[in-house]
Image (cartoon, helix red, strand yellow):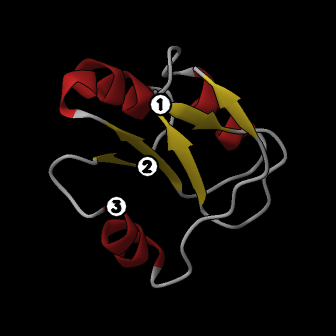
Amino acid sequence: MPVEMTTHLDAQPSGLGVGAQPGRGPRAAKEAGAETIIVTGLAKDARKLELARQFGATHTIDVEQEDTVERVREITGGALAGVSGLSRA
């Protein structure tokens, strides 16, 4: 089950799961000031990942095709991602 990570975000990159409402997390992260917004999902979530990009995700990761940790390290220059809250989709 995807997990959406949102709420209080600072200047750190933010990691989000695509969840049931793919626009909510990226939009909230962007409004909270996140500059790098990374959304993860499965291959079957391709449409949701596209919507997440339309709503502000700067990067999306298909976790079935890419090593998520390595990809996040690459995107963030090794900083990984800050997360402040979890909610099940």
**Place of residue 42 in the rendered image (x, y in percent of width and height, measured from the top left):** 27, 34
Which circle's residue, 2 or 1, is located before the other in the chain?
A: 1
**Place of residue 40 in the rendered image (x, y in percent of width and height, measured from the top left):** 39, 43
Give the mark toward the camera: 2 or 1: 1
* Left or right: 10 in relation to 47: right
Query: Which residue of the protein is positioned furthest toward the top in this rendering?
Result: 20
Which type of secondary structure does the marked residue at label 2 adopt?
loop
Where does label 1 land, which residue? 2
* Left or right: 32 in relation to 34: right
Residue at (50% x, 24% y) in the render: 19
Which type of secondary structure does the marked residue at label 3 adopt?
helix
Which type of secondary structure does the marked residue at label 1 adopt?
loop
Measured along the vertical axis of the image, is residue 28 above or below residue 81? Answer: above
Residue at (85% x, 46% y) in the render: 8
Residue at (68% x, 41% y) in the render: 29
Cβ–Cβ below 8 Å for labels 2 and 1?
A: no
**Place of residue 36 in the rendered image (x, y in percent of width and height, measured from the top left):** 54, 58
Which circle's residue, 1 or 3, is located before the other in the chain?
A: 1
CA distance separating discs 3 and 2? 15 Å
The circle drawn on residue 68 is: 3
Measured along the vertical axis of the image, is residue 42 above or below residue 61? Answer: above
Q: Amino acid at mark 1?
A: Pro
Query: Which residue of the protein is positioned furthest toward the right in this rendering?
Result: 8
Cβ–Cβ below 8 Å for labels 3 and 2?
A: no
* Left or right: 17 in relation to 5: left
Where does label 2 land, which residue? 58
CA distance separating discs 2 and 1? 19 Å
Which circle's residue, 3 or 2, is located before the other in the chain?
A: 2
**Place of residue 86 in the rendered image (x, y in percent of width and height, measured from the top left):** 71, 38
